[in-house]
Image: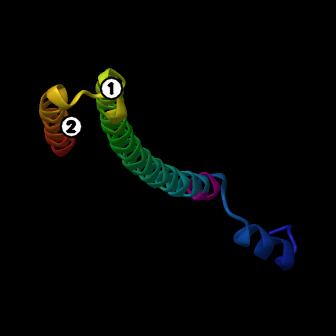
């Protein structure tokens, strides 16, 4: 009882080491829960982003294939076009044969275009 009353009250109000340790542990657990929640959200967003990137890649690959197919058809069409004689150079006797070839080429190109 050698301590003044004010000092004794102050000592009663100060937390003990155990109380302080409990408060710190509680704060650490709370922060740990927040970190875990944030980590789960980050994993979910990363997974969603990965799915979007994979879909975009798949569509780009499909586009590339379509462009490759189109390029092959254009090359074929250019070959047919260069093989044809100008109309002014055709002989009347061979005109029907050239008309038939042109018709077959046009049908083939049309059919090929529809398949794309």
Which label sits in the foreground, 1 or 2?
Answer: 1
Q: Determine the residue positioned at 41% across, 42% down.
A: 53
User: x, y (%) of residue 30?
Assistant: 51, 58
Name the residue at the front extreme. 92
Residue 56 is left or right of residue 38, and the answer is: left
User: x, y (%) of residue 104?
Assistant: 12, 34
**Label 1 or label 2, whichever comes before in sequence order:** 1
- Position above or below: 89 against 57: above
Quarter of the figure that contains the N terminus? bottom right
Mark 1–mark 2 contact, CB under 8 Å?
Answer: no
Tell whether position 77 is magenta.
no
Magenta stretch: helix, strand or loop mostly = helix
Residue 109 numbered mark, or none? 2
Quarter of the figure that contains the C terminus? top left
Q: Give the structural element (helix, strand or loop) at label 1.
A: loop
Residue 113 numbered mark, or none? none
Please name the residue that numbered disc 1 is placed on: 85
Mark 2 surroundings: few (<14), some (14-19) or many (≥20) residues within 10 A: some
User: x, y (%) of residue 91?
Assistant: 24, 27
- Position above or below: 111 against 4: above
Q: Determine the residue positioned at 33% across, 29% down.
A: 81
Rendering quarter of residue 87 = top left
User: x, y (%) of residue 90?
Assistant: 28, 28
Q: Nearer the viewer, residue 74 or 16?
A: 74
- Position above or below: 77 against 11: above
Q: Determine the residue positioned at 49% across, 53% down.
A: 38
Residue 35 is left or right of residue 5, and the answer is: left
Residue 10 is left or right of residue 111, and the answer is: right
Give, as a single range, the part of the protein colored magenta: 19-23
Q: Nearer the viewer, residue 54 or 80?
A: 80
């Amino acid at each position: 009882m050698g301590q003044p009353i004010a000092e004794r009250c102050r000592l009663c109000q100060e937390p003990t080491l155990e109380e302080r340790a409990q408060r710190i542990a509680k704060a650490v657990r709370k922060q740990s829960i927040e970190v875990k929640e944030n980590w789960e959200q980050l994993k979910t967003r990363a997974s969603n982003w990965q799915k979007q990137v994979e879909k975009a890649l798949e569509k780009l690959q499909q586009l590339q294939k379509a462009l490759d197919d189109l390029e092959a058809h254009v090359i074929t069409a250019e070959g047919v076009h260069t093989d044809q004689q100008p109309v002014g150079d055709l002989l009347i006797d061979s005109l029907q044969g050239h008309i038939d070839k042109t018709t077959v080429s046009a049908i083939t190109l049309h059919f090929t275009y529809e398949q794309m």
